[in-house]
Image (cartoon, rainbow, N blue to C red):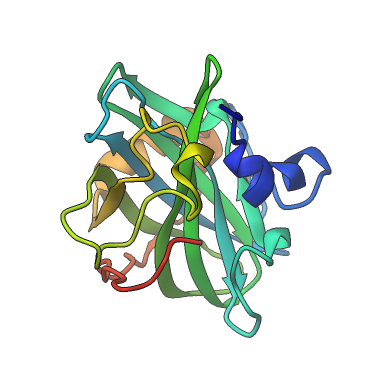
Amino acid sequence: MIRFKLFFILYLVFVITGCGYNMALTKGQTDVDVTKKSIALLSVKISNQFKPNYQLEVMGSLICPQSERCGHGAVKYFYKTNSAYRIKSAENSFNEYLLSYELENGSYNFHSIGAAYDHNGISGGGSVPLNYKFEIKSNSITYLGHLDIVMREMKNNSEIRAGRVGPPWQQNPVVGAYTGTYDVAVEDRFEEDMKLFISEYPALKKAKVDKAILPQWIRPENIKAQ
């Protein structure tokens, strides 16, 4: 079986070549500057309930200005995540992250989150379709909410596939992405999440943080995963 490096095709090739953006905040940061760009905060929990032995990791977020076409060709708007931003992990259960995006003021399309399992010669995953529209104000720090992402088995063909479309051998079936789909819930966990953000990024303790929770997710149907 050919090992299918999904995110080297979709995203990771751009990470290696230096394209895209890093998270806005770094662990232990004691000062934050929003005079030039604003910052958006988001917590994400992702769980593979279909194949719990193969928990997905958040690889990054695709966030584009609404004035531009947003899709997998817009990789310059990919905000990379790595294990440094994972704050909680439970074996065979979930991974949880604190994400931060440096953005200019304006209107944005939060297109998707890249999720993958890639360990010990086993690879699989895909992009979580979000398609949220949101606004960022000048010189601000904004909490967007908490995303609870679950991968489960597809019930019918109208549900969007969690994995990249292609022959089944292109994804290791044990991960579950080829026959799985995503559920996404948005929650307002401002008080709880801000304690976590401040513990990781002390600069936020002195900062004013606005709240603009993303709308509830609308399930895309009868379309193919990109």
- Answer whether residue 124 is visible to the viewer in this image: yes
| Relative height, residue 120 to residue 112 (above, below) | above
Quarter location, residue 214: bottom left
Question: Where residue 75 sits in the image (x, y, percent)?
Answer: 69, 59
Looking at this rendering, what residue extends furthest in the left direction? 155
If the image is split into quadrants, where does the N terminus sit?
top right
Residue lying at 38% horizontally and 72% vertically, measured from the top left: 223
Position of residue 169 in the picture relative to residue 82 (left or right): left
Residue lying at 28% horizontally and 43% vertically, measured from the top left: 151
Decide which of 151, 90 is in the foreground and name it.
Answer: 151
- Answer whether residue 58 is visible to the viewer in this image: no
Decide which of 56, 80 is in the foreground and name it.
Answer: 56
Question: Where residue 191 sits in the image (x, y, percent)?
Answer: 26, 45
Position of residue 207 in the picture relative to residue 29 (left or right): left
Question: Where residue 47 sits in the image (x, y, percent)?
Answer: 29, 35
Decide which of 150, 97 is in the foreground and name it.
Answer: 150
Position of residue 68 in the picture relative to residue 57 (left or right): right
| Relative height, residue 83 to residue 139 (above, below) | above
Residue lying at 67% horizontally and 52% vertically, measured from the top left: 33
